[in-house]
Image (cartoon, rainbow, N blue to C red):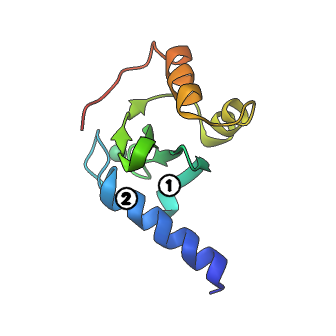
Amino acid sequence: MDSVSNALLQKKQFFIDSVAKFCDKCGTPYTVDDLNIVQSTGAGTIIHFSCQNCKSKHVASLVMPLGLSQRMPVNMDLDSSEMEKFMSQKELTKQNILEAYEELKDLKTITL
Ligand SMILES: [Zn+2]
């Protein structure tokens, strides 16, 4: 395995460990294959989870102002390609993450 994909796998494993280890709906453990990093900048990271078992989709973001992390997971029906399209329209900043969630506010917010 080359070092770039190895680093990506480690990053994905980190998000599984720190954000969502299991599917909210059916409890199936996520693997690195179920996770897609939609966007990652110094201001934060948006991760898309999809469950192999029940096909439910889950999006989480980590915002890191001053080294603090914050989780704002939502359930949503967009698939990861639609999410990428949505998020690629603008540079990701902390404010943009909040705006994105405003635009998606009909979606249910879950507190982990
Ligand atoms: Zn599931």
Q: Quadrant of the C terminus?
A: top left
Residue at mark 2:
16
- Under mark 2, the amino acid is Ile
Q: Residue furthest top?
A: 106
| 29 over 58 or under it: above or below | below
Residue 29 visible to an observer of this rendering:
no
User: From the viewer's perspective, is residue 55 above or below residue 9?
Assistant: above
The residue identified by callout 1 is 35
Label 1, secondary structure: give it: strand
Asked if the residue under mark 1 is in contact with the one under mark 2, i.e. CB atoms within 8 Å, the reply is yes
**Residue 100 in the image: above or below residue 38:** above
Residue 92 in which image quadrant: top right
For the point 60% across and 49% down, which residue is it? 41
> Percent from the top left, x then y, of residue 18?
32, 56
Query: Residue 102's spot in the image, x, y percent?
Result: 51, 15
Element at label 2: helix
Looking at the image, which residue is at 32% across and 61% down? 17
Q: Nearer the viewer, residue 54 or 89?
A: 89
> At which x and y percent is residue 72?
38, 33
Residue 21 in picture, x, y percent from top left: 30, 56
Amino acid identity at mark 1: Leu
Label 2 to label 1: alpha-carbon separation: 8 Å
- In the rendered image, is residue 10 in sight? yes
Instruction: Work out whether residue 79 or residue 2 is closer to the camera in this orientation and state it.
Output: 2
